[in-house]
Image: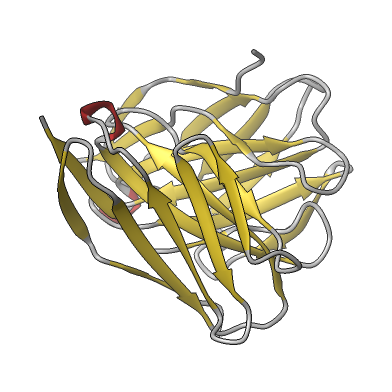
Amino acid sequence: QQQVKQSPQSLIVQKGGISIINCAYENTAFDYFPWYQQFPGKGPALLIAIRPDVSEKKEGRFTISFNKSAKQFSLHIMDSQPGDSATYFCAAQKGVAGNMLTFGGGTRLMVKP
Amino acid sequence: EPEVTQTPSHQVTQMGQEVILRCVPISNHLYFYWYRQILGQKVEFLVSFYNNEISEKSEIFDDQFSVERPDGSNFTLKIRSTKLEDSAMYFCASLAQGNNQPQHFGDGTRLSIL
């Protein structure tokens, strides 16, 4: 019940295309859902995050869509660029600030020029 | 922008030896974490630390692991008797007080057990 399932494991997109990564969770106590971007040799860096009281959040080319009833959320990267090539992790956190993050398995994105 | 810094970037240790991984969290942050990432796998929670004590730990964080904040700035992870399966990237993270605050991660220490 603590798991966050992420798909696909890898994704290849042409420059200018849309990258879509999906995550699903079981634990309804989760109430904070961040996405992290990780480049080789670096730590995860927060990209965008959402709480379940909204269905969508957009920051620049990055959008989170959230479906509370289905317990699913997804990251959309519009106009994907080669510089977006990285590993993306969804995560979930429950309860008050300070609790642990539960990460999905990661998606390795490659954007071809 | 303030960063979480971790040292060393790479640690090579013989199996059975003790190792200490060091982290300097962002200065006004109050919550501290260790996570690990085995090569090619997901990031896994180890332990969280708040107000000078462990607030939560995973089943991975057994008796061979300990954490300490010895001087108000450093946050350390000690592995007492390392095993081959401890080989992984270890990430430190810190968090400021308040809702909607993200955890900030360091760039990790690659631990290689021989």
Q: Residue B102 occupies which quadrant of the picture?
A: top right
Instruction: Please tell me which residue lies in front, A25 or B12.
Output: A25
x 51%, y 31%: residue: B21
x 44%, y 38%: residue: A61
Q: In the shown orientation, is residue A9 left or right of residue A12?
A: right
Residue A86, x across and y down, in percent:
28, 38
Is residue A105 in view?
no
Is residue A95 in view?
yes
Q: In the shown orientation, is residue A22 left or right of residue B15?
A: right
**Is residue A92 positioned above or below B14 on the image?**
below
Residue A2, x across and y down, in percent:
56, 78
Residue A104, x across and y down, in percent:
42, 64
Q: In the shown orientation, is residue B6 left or right of residue A57?
A: left
So how many labels did they put on this image? 0
| Residue furthest top as drawn | B1
| Quarter that holds the C terminus of chain A | top left
x 44%, y 56%: residue: A75
| Quarter that holds the N terminus of chain A | bottom right
Q: In the shown orientation, is residue B19 left or right of residue B30?
A: left
